[in-house]
Amino acid sequence: GEEIASAGYFGLTLGKDAPASLTAILDEGLVHAYDRALFNARHKARAKLRFGQLGESLWDMDLAPVEIVRESVPAEYEIDPCSISPKKISSHLRDISKELAAMDSRILYNQVGASTMLEREFFTSSEGAAIDQTFAITHGMAYVVASGKEGIQEHYDDIGHQRGWEVIESGCRGPLIFSKDLRSFSLALAHDTLELADAPPLPDTGKPVTVVTDPHFNALLAHEIIGHPNELDRALKMETAYAGRSWLLHDLENNQIGRQIASPLLSAYSDPTLPGFGHYLYDDEGTRGRKVYHIERGMYRGFMNSRQTAAVFGEEPNGSYKSTDASLVPLIRMSTTVIENGNRAAGDIIGEIDHGYYLVGHRIPSIAESRENFRITARKVYEIKNGARGRLFRDGGITADSRDFLMQIDAVGNDFRIFPISNCGKGQPMQSKKLGNGGPSLRSRARLTGTSG
């Protein structure tokens, strides 16, 4: 039958004693990957012959070339995660939880969690790559349920960084990532939850109004309407059944590349060299991660890719192929996808508004399958009157067409920040990944919807 090239892959999660037997593990893995490649190629060739015109959609596995690297990358931390005992973690969390419970009788329930670890990844390929990367990963979360005059509110949020236990005890002081220690962070979340339990629901505006969104809200905006539709496996329909498609690419001839999709004030990109959960130097194909613009001054530029999808497009791989476990085949994933910093003070952006709304923090996304429209709710919504922040509302968010919202941005703040996204899911079997998103404050126009709308 007709010959066709296909890929083989092997991955294994190892224990701390594995380096002593690494040579034998690699020998076994090479045989396994070779056998898998032959199996895939044979069955793909048979399918291509069997299914006629439909089979013509199957093609050889071509990989765009990359620099072959042999490098070791150490973790960064002040307090070694391996020096922190489970007993110390549970004691610290119990103390915070008790303090939250004692804060106010209207707090009905709270949950506080934390983890700190070192994760080491070793990648080798038949091309000669050998890359050893170690990451310190520390994550904290708080969840609070409170009752008030307007009913019950529940809120959840995270802190996290590729650093050690100091993230939990001392917080993050930059660059680009700023968070309180877990105790102060949890108490602040509880205060917000109590305040919102007494706040009225946001009325539906019925028509577009002027809105200002803060960096925390824009982290989820960047994630959902910029990050996901810029994953090229999704755009090429490879992930349609599990993750959806992308409005940015209907097919190779009909797409948004080189077209204006946003205000000239807006630029957005993915960059794994930025700090936070999304940071790495090399992806899981051994490709060096690099900054890739998706939107540059309003014009659409391009996608996150793998070596295979880069070959389809005739482009250079940008190092966006990652798995959450060695045994799982990588997928094209966000690293740190952000909206680029602007030059306006957030206070001035709000001060110019006669009447509008200021959205602070993000809560729940509801996004179209191809990401062409969205509803994202905020933790807090403040009415703006005569340039000043006024009445607080709960349970409100933006409902908009993605292109319309991006095109109507008329101010971009200079308050850029990166936030942790701790549970981005994709694929089958599901891979839940920690990554980063962020941006500055933005001003645009959109309809606001709430529980009373």
Image: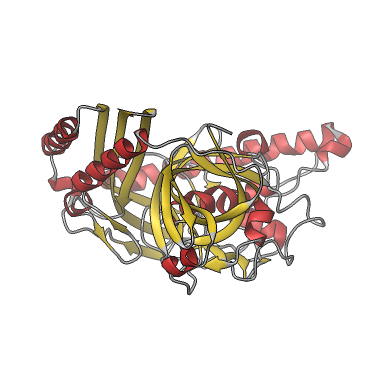
Q: Quadrant of residue 111?
A: top left
Residue 414 left/right relative to 369: left
In the image, 294 versus 359, the foreground residue is 359
Residue 56 at what x, y percent from top left?
Answer: 83, 43
Q: Above or below — where is 43 with respect to 175?
A: above
Is 383 displayed left or right of 81 in the figure?
right
Q: Quadrant of the C terminus?
A: top right
Identify the residue shown where x is 76% and y is 56%: 255
* Near-viewer residue (80 or 406): 406
> Which is nearer the eye, 452 or 40?
452
Q: Position of residue 147 (x, y in %)?
A: 31, 27
406 or 319: which is nearer to us?
A: 406
**Residue at far front of view:** 386
When the figure is inspected, residue 351 is found, relative to residue 108, above or below; the finding is below
Query: Which residue is at a point 37% across and 42% down the rendered structure image?
Result: 25
Q: Is residue 215 visible?
A: yes
Q: Position of residue 218 (x, y in %)?
A: 49, 54
Residue placed farthest to the bottom in the image? 343
* Residue 280 in sight in this render: no
Query: Residue at horizontal 34%, vertical 29%?
Result: 149
Residue at (68, 59) in percent of width and height: 311
Q: Quadrant of the N terminus?
A: top right
Q: Position of residue 127 (x, y in %)?
A: 52, 59
